[in-house]
Image: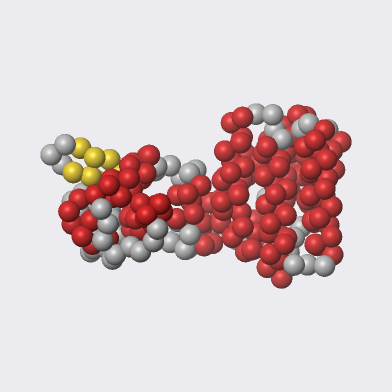
Amino acid sequence: MSSSFTAIAGSKRSLHVQVAREIARRILSGQLEQGQVIPGEMTLCEQFGISRTALREAVKLLTSKGLLESKPKIGTKVVDRINWNFLDPQLLEWMDGLQNSEVFFHQFLGLRKAIEPEACALAARNATAEQRIELSETFQQMSEIADSFDQSRWAEVDMRFHRLIFLSTGNDFYLPFGNVLATIFMSFIHHSSKDGGVCINEHRAIYDAIMAGNADKARLASQQLLQEEKHRLPSEVA
């Protein structure tokens, strides 16, 4: 496979991020294979039209995300997929458009099924008064948008609703998932809410249970929302 890159144009501040993105997308798409040694510094600097400093910053960024590793006498190579940090918000952003969207959304829904019902239960137990007020204001906006549907506004407010739930768990280990949601959720909601499919009654059940402090009902309501058919997804994806 070709490992040639084209020159990058942009501000010096973001140059290394743009380079990292281009290399990452080659890795994530399989154009740069696992275990493959990427071209050397001089070659990449020439292809991208950048300095060695910018390239090293890009490699450092990709190393922190588990995509690359550098070894003496070997060079910089692509790390095995099992070590890639798929929960990194920036990495998820770079993946956009590289995979079959239906498969990607199905995997994302699987992650939500594994963690979000318990997050709702924890939010019902642990949300502060301020967080409940914010959740109430957000759900009120959701209800208004559902009555006069605007997909862009719905995606933004729906994302905020679910992110608030993770932030209201009282458990710091749930916080990163709120950030993951913020990264992927917009495209997922745009897919699931096409033609006005907002599942407002299911969201209301989650909201009511959290506000009432009923963890069991919050968990069950979340499970009801996270069914494939409610997000325009088949029960199984090949």
Residue at the far front: name it: 12
Is residue 191 at least partly visible in the picture? yes
Q: Nearer the viewer, residue 217 or 140?
A: 140
Q: Nearer the viewer, residue 4 or 238?
A: 4
State the colouring used for the structure image.
Answer: secondary structure
Rendering coords of residue 199 (x, y %): 76, 57
Rendering coords of residue 37 (x, y %): 21, 49
Identity of the residue drawn at 48% across and 59% down: 96
Rendering coords of residue 50 (x, y %): 27, 57
Give the mark count. Answer: 0
178 horizontally vs 43: left or right? right
Looking at the picture, does residue 206 appear above or below residue 12? above
Q: Nearer the viewer, residue 68 or 60?
A: 60
Rendering coords of residue 33 (x, y %): 28, 53
84 horizontally vs 53: left or right? right
Is residue 109 at least partly visible in the picture? no
213 horizontally vs 75: left or right? right
Looking at the picture, does residue 176 appear above or below residue 235? above
Identity of the residue drawn at 80% across and 35% down: 130
Looking at the picture, does residue 227 appear above or below residue 97? above
Could you tell me which quadrant the N terminus lies in? bottom left
Identity of the residue drawn at 40% across and 52% down: 13
128 horizontally vs 108: left or right? right
